Amino acid sequence: TTGRPTDRGNTRMMLNTDICLVHNIDGNLPCCTNPGRFYSNGQDRCLDDEATARRCPIYNQMNPRSEARTVVGQMLGGAYPNDNNEPFYNAFTDAWRKATTVGNDNLSPLGENCEQ
């Protein structure tokens, strides 16, 4: 994983499964997606010195995985960093509806609590 849950209240972190959508980490570990950024105490935000020394390469357009990198950019909703989660939530809403209703045509809405 990358990121730290105690990073100034930022509870975001990325798993290797997330990172590999943009960065080519196959055979390139350890590496850091964004070396040279520091915590207020001066510690590098990369998890260890070996990773800090090597930036994780990004997929180029010739790589078969480049489409995933493009979609990650779309899910960011614009330039990074930002707080625009709307593209992700819209896509997730559609995917959730499909995943939970497939083959079912007589579903009822959830109640406000478990007693209903």
Image (spheres, grey):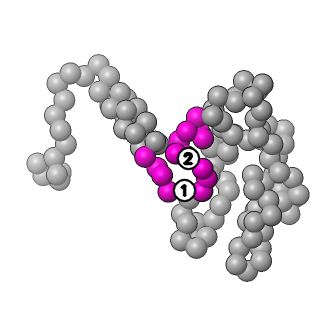
Q: Quadrant of residue 108?
A: top left
Q: Name the residue under label 1.
A: 82
The residue located at (60%, 56%) in the rendering is: 81
Residue 44 point in image, percent of width and height = 78, 68
Residue 93 point in image, percent of width and height = 36, 38
Residue 103 as seen in the image, left or right of residue 94? left
Residue 87's place in the image compared with 103, above or below, is below
Amino acid at dot 2: Gly
What SS does tag 1 mark?
A: loop
Residue 1 in sight in this render: yes
The residue located at (55%, 66%) in the rendering is: 10
Residue 84 as seen in the image, left or right of residue 108? right
Whether residue 54 is in magenta: the answer is no
Task: Using the image as rendered, state which of residue 19 and residue 84 is in the foreground.
Answer: 84
Given contact means CB atoms under 8 Å apart, are the residues at marks 1 and 2 in contact?
yes
What segment carries the magenta color?
71-86
